[in-house]
Image (cartoon, rainbow, N blue to C red):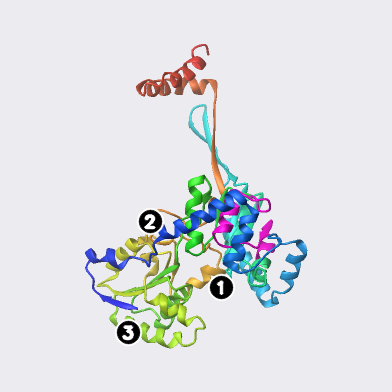
């Protein structure tokens, strides 16, 4: 990790850059995959699965027998941990349920808003060396609470033609209705456009590599919604002299091990903290099985020394991290000043790993600075908000002149007439 000491604010823009691949090139490679699946459906999906995943499949869908068999392969301790996580995730997301509240905005004019579930949603879950079964919980549980009728999950098969059993188990108990052994851009295309086997959905959720990210961006041009702009994972640790260097190093490493294009930032006003954290990183790296991947990510990562807590807050809000850990003395005061972040972790004993797995909050969050404008996935992500209004005859008599005046000023005579016809004889 490169260290920057007291950079002036005019240089911060350079320091908040991420490791960005040329996404336009990736889109051009992905576009033919989407077009082929849209045209040839299952035939194209099978061909791409054999080409990219190296496995020939007769069927994509997991049968009930296959689901039962894969669930039996999951270690009982892991099942217990997943069930504990589900309790917390469900409790947190159920707290986001909003009751319908009717508001009389004027005498005889009543308005209200109702959450309505998106009927069909698709979940993409990466497999490979780090099968993200935790993401199944983060997406399927709020979808289930929202009342989505169809929850479709796609995850790439291994060389044995199977999905990781922990992903299958998590999907089975979290409310997923259909599971398919399909990965990559072809999975996104299948859920977007539908095939003979895989149903089309209204909105697609989930992380993935650059091809999956590009595919998700492209399908929005065809009217299919996605959860949020996503890229490689990232964390910022804001630390003062009260922080524990061992903890800080572990937090930086835990994010870096996600992938070579992940990013970890240490922002501090203590030069001694930087030196201690550097030593801890070297020590802890030796124990990590994904050390080579982590080292590559650390090349995209930085340690930034600033003059005081005020500068640290300003820098953080400009960076807008996906994950922000506040390892500072007065972290509640600092938290109140944070306006751009995906998820915030307060104090020395709140690791980012807790949010990734089991504290209850959702770990599907905006990256690449999108936290300036986007929220992470929550219950509302799986709902549409429909507004309703009811106006009485007397209510329209009183409100009508306002509407008529405004409509006339916009030269929309039919709008005015729609009111005038109702009020002239009442």
Residue 83 lies within the magenta run? no
The residue identified by callout 1 is 130
Q: Secondary structure at mark 1?
A: loop
The residue identified by callout 3 is 275
Q: Write the residue at 47% across / 59% down.
A: 29
Q: Secondary structure at mark 3?
A: helix
For the N terminus, the image quarter is bottom left
Mark 2, mark 1: which one is toward the viewer? 1
> Residue 210, how many percent across, how many down?
47, 63
> Residue 217, how many percent across, how many down?
47, 53
Region rendered in magenta: 170-199
Q: Residue furthest top?
A: 425
**Residue 137 shows up from this direction:** no
Q: Distance of mark 2 from mark 3, alpha carbons?
A: 31 Å
> Residue 346, how many percent across, how many down?
44, 69
N-term mark: 2 or 1: 1
Q: Write the residue at 40% across / 21% down.
A: 412
Q: Secondary structure at mark 2?
A: helix
Residues at badges 1 and 3 in contact (C-beta under 8 Å)?
no
Q: Distance of mark 2 from mark 1, alpha carbons?
A: 29 Å
Which image quadrant is residue 410 in?
top left
Q: Distance of mark 1 from mark 3, alpha carbons?
A: 31 Å
Label 3 environment density (alpha carbons within 10 Å; few <14, some 14–19, many ≥20): few
Q: Is residue 424 above or below residue 384?
A: above
Label 1 environment density (alpha carbons within 10 Å; few <14, some 14–19, many ≥20): few
N-term mark: 2 or 3: 3
Q: Is residue 75 above or below residue 105?
A: below
The residue identified by callout 2 is 372
């Amino acid at each position: 990790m490169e260290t920057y000491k007291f950079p002036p604010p005019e240089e911060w823009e350079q320091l908040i850059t991420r490791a960005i691949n040329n996404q336009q090139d990736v889109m051009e490679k992905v576009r033919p995959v989407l077009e082929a699946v849209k045209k040839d459906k299952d035939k194209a999906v099978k061909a791409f699965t054999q080409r990219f995943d190296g496995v020939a499949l007769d069927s994509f869908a997991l049968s009930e027998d296959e689901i039962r068999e894969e669930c039996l392969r999951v270690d009982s301790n892991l099942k217990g941990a997943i069930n504990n996580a589900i309790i917390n995730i469900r409790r947190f997301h159920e707290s986001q349920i909003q009751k319908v509240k009717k508001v009389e905005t004027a005498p005889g004019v009543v308005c209200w808003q109702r959450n309505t579930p998106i009927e069909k949603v698709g979940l993409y879950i990466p497999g490979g060396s780090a099968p993200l079964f935790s993401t199944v919980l983060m997406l399927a549980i709020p979808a289930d609470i929202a009342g989505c009728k169809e929850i479709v999950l796609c995850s790439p098969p291994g060389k044995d033609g199977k999905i990781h059993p922990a992903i299958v188990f998590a999907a089975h108990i979290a409310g997923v209705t259909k599971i398919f052994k399909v990965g990559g851009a072809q999975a996104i295309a299948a859920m977007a456009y539908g095939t003979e086997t895989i149903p089309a959905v209204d909105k697609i959720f989930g992380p993935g590599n650059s091809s999956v990210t590009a595919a998700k961006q492209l399908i929005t041009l065809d009217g299919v919604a996605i959860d949020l702009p996503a890229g490689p994972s990232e964390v910022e640790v804001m630390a003062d002299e009260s922080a524990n260097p061992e903890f800080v190093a572990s937090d930086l490493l835990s994010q870096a091990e996600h992938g070579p294009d992940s990013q970890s930032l240490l922002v501090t006003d203590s030069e001694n903290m930087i030196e201690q954290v550097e030593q801890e990183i070297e020590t802890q790296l030796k124990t990590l099985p994904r050390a080579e991947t982590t080292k590559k990510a650390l090349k995209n990562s930085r340690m930034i020394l600033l003059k005081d807590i005020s500068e640290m807050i300003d820098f953080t809000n400009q960076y807008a991290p996906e994950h922000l850990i506040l390892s500072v003395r007065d972290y509640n005061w600092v938290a109140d000043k944070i306006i751009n972040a995906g998820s915030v972790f307060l104090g020395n004993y709140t690791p980012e790993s807790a949010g990734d797995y089991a504290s209850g909050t959702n770990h599907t969050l905006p990256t690449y600075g999108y936290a300036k404008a986007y929220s992470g996935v929550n219950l509302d992500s799986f709902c549409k908000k429909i507004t309703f209004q009811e106006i009485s005859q007397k209510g329209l008599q009183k409100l009508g002149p306002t509407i008529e005046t405004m409509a006339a000023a916009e030269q929309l005579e039919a709008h005015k007439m729609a009111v005038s016809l109702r009020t002239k004889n009442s």
